[in-house]
Amino acid sequence: MSFPVICPVCKKPLVFREKTAVCENGHSFDRSKEGSVNLILNGSASAGDDPVMIAARKRFLEKGHYDHLLFAMKEAMKDRVFSGAVAADACCGEGYYTNALQAAFPEVSFYGFDLSKRALRYAAKEAEKALFFAANISSVPISDLSVNILIHVFAPVNEKEFLRILAPDGVLIHVFPGKDHLMGIKRALYASARQNDEDSGISDAFEKVSGEKVTKILSLDNESLRDLITMTPYFYRTPKDSLEKALALPRLETETDFIINVYRKKREE
């Protein structure tokens, strides 16, 4: 069975088999025992998020703390899916959203890719149908104009690649932090907590179709608090003393503030 994923060497379609992915020119890529495929030609095995961040994010999300975001993403997708549609999750990490959305919309074929091979092993291990592969967002091994729904959650934007792989009537579902996202965490870590600037990073090459704010106050015990801090850049950027004080708190309340924008490629007049 062939897929919209293409060979990173010759750009021909790849066929995913039980243990390999192969193109018509004979280029072959081994699948991990979990099922993911490494399509990065030159890259470190340790690229992407580190194991500590990945494990923390997996534990946190599996407890359902961001299920209000997942519900809103399903709502944003439900009127845009159709049988045979192709969905790609750019920078999917350990595949929490990819696999949950695949379960919600079985008529859609989901593909997730990320720089981190370690994260993808988690994603593929828990996948029932979605396929996962390692790729750099600057050069995505997906064929031109083949993606109907492109999902992008809290990750760097590469508009050139997004425009290339999106079908003419395809949509980009872009999730990024609102101004008050994790302000409770920031107040615990820093003397002065600044709001986010709500910059989507999406240019006028895309036309905004809809936008929604999704907010909720989380009350976290110490275990979930530690995981939330560890899965963010604050864990690596905060002075040690401030970080240790925040990690020791028995409980903390924090805002979550997500923006979900839906875009399509701007049509030529």
Image (cartoon, grey):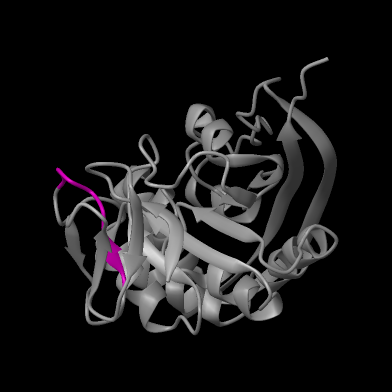
Is residue 42 magenta-colored? Answer: yes
Q: Nearer the viewer, residue 177 or 166?
A: 166
Up-down: is 249 above or below 5? below
Q: Magenta part mainly helix, strand or loop? A: loop
Residue shown at 61% from the left, 74% from the top? 102
Answer above or below: position of 256 versus 8.
Answer: below
Q: Which residues are magenta?
A: 36-43
The percent coordinates of residue 165 (x first, y second) are 53, 40
The image shows residue 51 at horizontal and vertical percentages of 26, 66
Q: Is residue 231 located in the magenta-colored stretch of the structure?
A: no
Going 53% across and 33% down the picture, which residue do you hit? 164
Q: As drawn, is 12 to the left or to the right of 128? A: left
The C terminus: image quadrant: top right
- Which quarter of the figure has residue 61? bottom right
Which x, y percent locates residue 240?
Answer: 29, 50
| 219, 258: nearer the viewer | 258
Q: Nearer the viewer, residue 12 or 192?
A: 12
